[in-house]
Image (cartoon, rainbow, N blue to C red):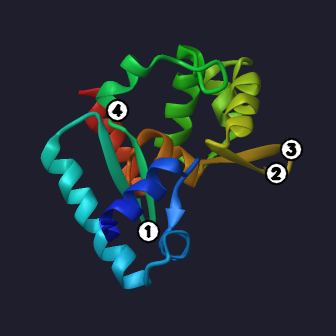
Amino acid sequence: MIFDKGLVEAALFSASGPLHLRDLAEKTGLSEESAYDSAESLIDDYNRREGAIQIIKTGKEYLMQLREEYTHVAGKTSDGEITKGTMKTLVTIAYNQPIMQSELFKNLGARVYDDVRTLVDMGLVSKKRVGQSAELTTTKKFSEYFGIGSTKKEDIRAWIDKKQR
C-alpha cells in the first residue's frame, strides 16, 4: 500500500534540490493540500527522530538534506568544497549584506575576487554591478545549502551569530 507521506518522502529524496509545493503535488499526483500536510508531517517525523537527515521548509519549498552536524561524515565533494578563505569571504558577505565588492576588498584583500567568482559560480552569492564595483548578497541557494530555513538577512545574521558562539 502506498501512502501520501511515502510519495512525498520519495519525491524529496530523489529531487536534486528544493521542491516547490506545487511541484511536489504534481510529482506525487497529490493535491497541494495533501502534499502540504504530508510534507509538514514528515518535517515533524524527521525532527522527532533526531537522525542525520532533515527536511527543511523555505517559503513554499521543501528540501531533504543532511543535518549540518553530520555533513563532515558524508565527506567533501570537489564541486562543492569551500576553502577556509572562501568561507571567510562568504560569511563576511552573508553577515554584512548587501556589501559592495570594493568594501570587501578593503577588509579582506585581493583574494576576494577569486572567492566571489567561486561563490557566484556555486550559486551561493549574487553579484549586481553598481558603478565601478558590484553589490554582493547571498542567494536562496545559500540558505538551502546551510539549512538556515530563511532568506531574510536578519535570520541569516542570527544564524551566523549562533554558529560563532
Q: Earlier in the sequence, mark 3 or mark 1?
A: 1
Q: Quadrant of the C terminus?
A: top left
Categorize mark 2 by other alpha carbons within 10 Å: few (<14), some (14-19), many (20+).
few
Residue 138 image offset from top left, x and y in percent = 58, 47
**Label 4: which secondary element:** helix
Is label 1 or label 2 in front? Answer: 1
Residue at image x 69%, y 25%?
115
Residue 25 image offset from top left, x and y in percent = 48, 75
Residue at image x 58%, y 22%?
82
Q: Earlier in the sequence, mark 1 or mark 2?
A: 1
| Viewer-nearest residue: 164 or 122 | 122
Is label 4 or label 2 in front? Answer: 4
43 to 36, vertically: above or below: above
Q: Amino acid at mark 2?
A: Arg
Q: Earlier in the sequence, mark 4 or mark 2?
A: 4
Label for residue 129? Answer: 2
Residue at image x 43%, y 21%?
74
**Label 3: which secondary element:** loop
Is label 4 or label 3 in front? Answer: 4
CA–CA distance between discs 1 and 2?
A: 28 Å
Q: Amino acid at mark 1?
A: Gly
Categorize mark 4 by other alpha carbons within 10 Å: few (<14), some (14-19), many (20+).
some
Q: Amino acid at mark 3?
A: Gln
Is any part of residue 42 visible from this angle? yes
Q: Amino acid at mark 4?
A: Glu
Mark 3 sits on what residue? 132
Is label 3 or label 2 in front? Answer: 2
Categorize mark 1 by other alpha carbons within 10 Å: few (<14), some (14-19), many (20+).
few
Mark 1 sits on what residue? 59
Mark 4 sits on what residue? 68
